[in-house]
Amino acid sequence: MRRLEKISEKIEKNFEKGKPLHPFYSLFDAADTFLLTPKDITKTGSHIRDAVDMKRAMMTVIVALLPTLLFGLWNIGYQHNYSIDGSTELHILSNFWYGFLVWLPIVITVYVSGLSVEIIFAQIRKHQVAEGFFVTGMLIPLIVPPGIPLWIVSLATIFAVIFGKEVFGGNGYNFLNPALLARAFIFFAYPSVISGNKVWIADKADAFSGATPLDICKNAADAGLNANELLQQLPSIFDSFIGIIPGSIGETSKLAILLGGIILVITGVASWRIMVSTMAGGYLTALLFNLFGSGAYAAVPAHQQILMGGLLFAAVFMATDPVSSTHTRQGEIIFGLLIGILTILVRQWNQGYVEGLVLGLFLMNVLAPLIDWCVIQLNINKRKRRAIKARV
Amino acid sequence: MPKVFKIRKGLNIKIKGESAKEILPFNASRFALKPDDFRWIVPKLLVNEGEAVKVGTPLFCDKENENLLFVSPASGTVKQIVRGEKRKIEYVEIESDNRFESVTIDIPPITNAQNITLTLQKYGLWNTIRELPFNRIARPNRSPKAIFISGFDTAPLAPDVSYLIENQIDTIQKGIDIITHLSKGKIYLSLYKKANNDELKTLSGIEFVYFTGKHPAGDVSVQIHKIYPINKGEIVWYIDLQSLIMIGKLFGNQKLDFSKKIAICGTGLEKRGYISIPQGAELSTFLSQNAKKGNYRIISGNILTGKNISQSPFAGYYHHQITVIPEGGQRRLFGWLAPGFTLWSYSRTYLAWLFPWKKFNPNSSLNGGIRPVIFNTYYDNVFPFDIFPAQLLKACIAEDIDLMENLGIYEVTEEDFALCEVICPSKIAWQEIILKGLTMLKD
């Protein structure tokens, strides 16, 4: 270890102020602290500090994403084979390998495009390279369809990092979730690659439908099917829960997502309040549609509705983004509830946006500061009332 | 049964290095008074180098209130007056003759607050009474809405307060009788419910309040927030028990004695216990005989809010604890990936959380790079005030005075944010930022 430290010190000298390589200091720092924890000691305030830092916290999110990712990769291969010859064999390794080869170019594209922007901005601003993008870069490939063109992914990532984050001051100052912005960008700029029946299975056989549960519901509404006919077309609850259905790479397996959620809640990195309230908001709204709605889609049982699409994935990994969600405990619950409610409302009422989640989450990211403002104002008013009472 | 407040939001950091309940032999030969120990005091020197002083001889006063004297804790000669940048007085050092002769003491009749205030200022004990908001020395001739005394300490490795004041209860009672005259409000003494409070419970003329739960339950500002929160424009005073002993001795026995018990703790020491010395004693000779080999940091106070006194190791004026911990700075390979069985973290991101009974070895590593605030609600878990810590921090960074006031900055001191600072994954200097905010508001 000492030897590594010495080597690092030696290299660092070339990046010091006044040296020709100084403009690239943030790059050196990123690599150096990637390898070894920083050597800084406390100067002011408390003399000891927690061992956790932003790198570790972000790494924990990535670990929590692993079950989803691993299952998602296998499912890409499985869905591909299933669409071609109806094979229901598990073929764990070969399906996984197939999926891995589909995923790898996407993730490389995302990291290369996003990190280039991050490093350029860190250099200009003389910041250290923030760790937030490691999570964003992991999330983006999980929320796009497997067959997405790479140039679109790259464009969306660059757009999301610049306009979702850097223009506002970088990590910690953004009000939109960059991964969500990337998906929304693709959805509005290139809708054909991220909606419809054809895109959710990699290299699918043309004859095979390949519709996600959400698409099935929309198609049923278009075709005027009744509730029973629709329910027969939908995948079983078991399949939806385990995730053997077409969809974005990471969203299909609810089981894997729940595993990740448990990791996040135990480690204390993400808020269980947001997770629970988002699902509760979705479930209750769907239940209201069950009771009072009309049409086949509204009759789909509430628990089945919240297993569709990316609602659970978003509740666990996207809505809990500590920066773009609300910054108060009480606000978290309202924030989550409204995401769930809006998602189901958009899905049910505006069939032009099959995945209402993107809109619901997007809107709530924008409204989160307002929720916080209200919560904080309540606290301020309480303090003022107490002061008035004390004076009387 | 009196009211019991339970502090749920907080954190007891389990670290090694407790002190044993025994008095270690120690005779200090040098003492120092540091103006920096007294917030926002502008010192005006009253002695020169080489002058002879007694216990109680004024060394400097406050430029704004020349009655407020800061006096020598020992008799001997002024060895040196150390100045820093811009001739700022760092400390006034006294070489002790070990006789502790005091100036002649002349106590006026205790009839009114005015007499008591002047006497306390004259003999250098007024500065033991401090004022909130701002955590400064109490401004004389103001009327606090109450006076608070904390009867326990929950900080890491904190001394057992009942041991600090053992067999001194009568003197404390005398001190309480004196300060009662200073406020029209009540005097509150907070006790830890599960602690041995037999001696303290015999006190009279005060209101007992009980606390239980995690650190910072023992911090007086937390207790004030729970008992009787401060509104804008109000002031409260607080004092610690050992200072009450000094006041009690002055008025009861006509004796000026600045000695107090201090816990010596931390993993940097071979032998840990308590010492009984006058305030401001020089510790390096004592600690160096006792220290383990290596690079250590000497902290006056606890590891959360104490001052680093490695450069000039004189015990801080208000502290009753000296902590010695190893300096950090050792780099770890792949910190973001390693399992971390021996690391301490409030989060459960390292596997050490599977062994909650384990005490860990503290050091002064920052353990990460400085980042903007990301985990905004994470701090709520360790912050027992009805205040939004991250939002108040941001208001201080933005220097938004109205927002700071609205968010309740008058109810807190920077030390209340120590736990937020410790657990902060963004490694933000919370206490420094909050203090800057408070300094903007001072009148």
Image (spheres, coloured by chain):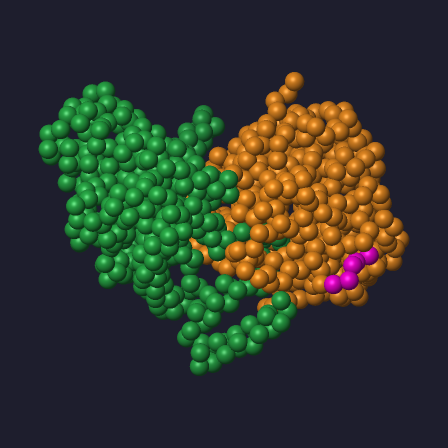
Q: Colour of chain B?
A: orange
Q: Is residue B293 magenta?
A: yes
Query: Who is closer to the viewer here, A191 or A2?
Result: A191
Which image quadrant for residue B346? top right
Q: Is residue A363 magenta?
A: no
Query: Who is closer to the viewer here, B222 or B251?
Result: B222
Determine the main secondary structure of the stretch shown in magenta: loop
> Which residue is found at the position 61% from the left and 24% from the top?
B4
Image spot of residue B213 (x, y percent): 62, 32
Q: What stretch of residues is rendered in magenta? A: B290-294
Which image quadrant for residue B80? bottom right
> Which residue is found at the position 77% from the left and 49% from the top?
B264
Query: Who is closer to the viewer here, B368 or B25?
Result: B368
* Residue lying furthest top: B1
Which image quadrant: the N terminus of chain B?
top right
> Which residue is found at the position 19% from the left and 34% from the top?
A217
Q: Colour of chain A?
A: green
> Which residue is found at the position 53% from the left and 76% from the top?
A11
